[in-house]
Image (cartoon, helix red, strand yellow):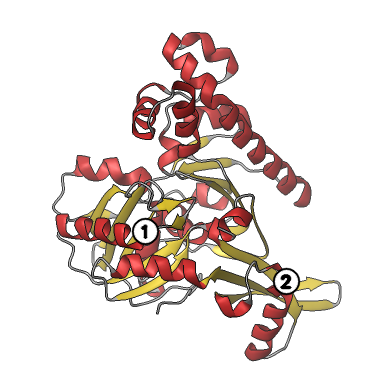
Amino acid sequence: MAKISLPTRGPQARLGIDIGSRYIKVAQINPSAHGLQLVNVGMAATPIGSITDGVVNSAEAIGEALHQIIKYFNIKERRAVCSLPGRSVVIRQVTLPSNISDKEIKVAAIGEVERFLPFPLDEMEYDYQILGDIQTGDVKQTSVLFIAAHREAVQKRVEAVRGAGIDSIEVDVDPLVILRSTVESALFEDQDTFTQTILLIDMGASATSISILKSGILRFTRIFAIGGDTLTHAIEAGYGLGFLEAEKLKKEKAVAFLDEERMDLDPESREINEMIKSHLDTLSLEIRRSLAYYTSKDRGEGVTKIVITGGGSMLKGMARFFEEDLGIPVMYGNSLQNISYVGGLELEEVAKMVPYMGIAVGLTLRQVPQKILGRYCLRVGIEPKYEFGSTTQASSLSS
């Protein structure tokens, strides 16, 4: 059985598989003399009802859908890495005495986080990584990142992937994976952006995660229970439609707008946006609170650029909404910006997948050896005092 292995890189799995609430995405990247090359890519809708708030309900249905993607896009690779959404994982930074052995670090880390785990330790898969030393006055301590997930959540993902005919499976977690594709790779040519303090907003179907990085060092992550489906459900309830009809209407008519722009919209768009506005305002408020907390904690230092990604970010006007509301320049992330495509699909077809491929691309980048990756990508590190929090975690872990 595959176990969590986080957030390390591994040499085995070459196929990145992102099982999302709305879409299943697959990517394979190989290093070459010409740089990193995307050799396989594909996506399809996640079977309705097979995932709820990141929890797999039907591994069989997902496995069959994934099998069809692999067959349709003629993917031959049978070693894969998938990931768990951040709201399904316990991530905690703990501080331990320095100069203790690796075995003692493991025992001490477990002792520090065990009281925060929603299940007994013997029902969890877990891993840890030493982040570095923290100096407080004359006291030197070791910072450790501890990550755990309920074994059943891991097994369901593995079962789904194995049902598609995949032989070897590794497991990672979304909040750390997205950094590889959206920051390490996509911003490689823009050194100035990489060295700034960046807010990365990854808006998925059922949740939105934000991460703050300074000069390539991850310092802060929060996850909120608002995603693209939240807006679709609001339209669904407002008009009494089915989900697919509401999703179609959202894509065609919904716009993220500021109050002063309301009268510029046609009547139907205004009506739809009255249904979704409260959710967008709540998300923006939570992000502002997180930014205020970060600024107060880090001696007034603020974010200088926002990078947005994820399927939910494709709502019309979303980039401008964040830029105007938060007062910070916004750019879209592109996980394939510096990766060439050498497969058989039309480039226009691949381009349509780009906003959804951040996790899948980040997963397949995991297997590229660091000595090769370093030629083409910058390396994101993790601050020893890194903080992680999730407003969605408690309900997801207890489902």
> Which residue is depicted at the point 73% across and 42% down?
292
Residue marked by disc 2:
115
Q: CA distance from mark 1 to mark 2?
A: 30 Å
Q: Quadrant for residue 79, please give it.
A: bottom left
Q: Label 2: few (<14), some or many (≥20) within 10 Å? A: few
* Upstream in sequence: badge 1 or badge 2: 1
Q: Position of residue 272 (x, y in %)?
A: 47, 20
Residue 179 vertical position relative to residue 256 in the rendered view, above or below: below
> Which residue is depicted at the point 56% across and 41% down?
305
Residue 78 vertical position relative to residue 185 in the rendered view, above or below: below
Asked whether 250 or 309 is in front, the reply is 250
**Label 1 residue SS:** loop
Residue 38 visible within the image:
no
> Which numbered mark, 1 or 2, is in the foreground of this view?
1
Q: Position of residue 326 (x, y in %)?
A: 62, 32
Q: Position of residue 109 (x, y in %)?
A: 68, 78
Residue 138 visible within the image:
yes
Asked whether 364 or 85 is in front, the reply is 85
Asked whether 312 or 395 is in front, the reply is 395
Q: Quarter of the image containing the N terminus?
A: bottom left
**Label 2 residue SS:** helix
Residue marked by disc 1:
58
- Which amino acid, by three-letter code, is at mark 2? Arg
Left or right placement of residue 287 versus residue 10 in this view: right
> Which residue is depicted at the point 54% across and 68% down?
149
Q: Label 1: few (<14), some or many (≥20) within 10 Å? A: some
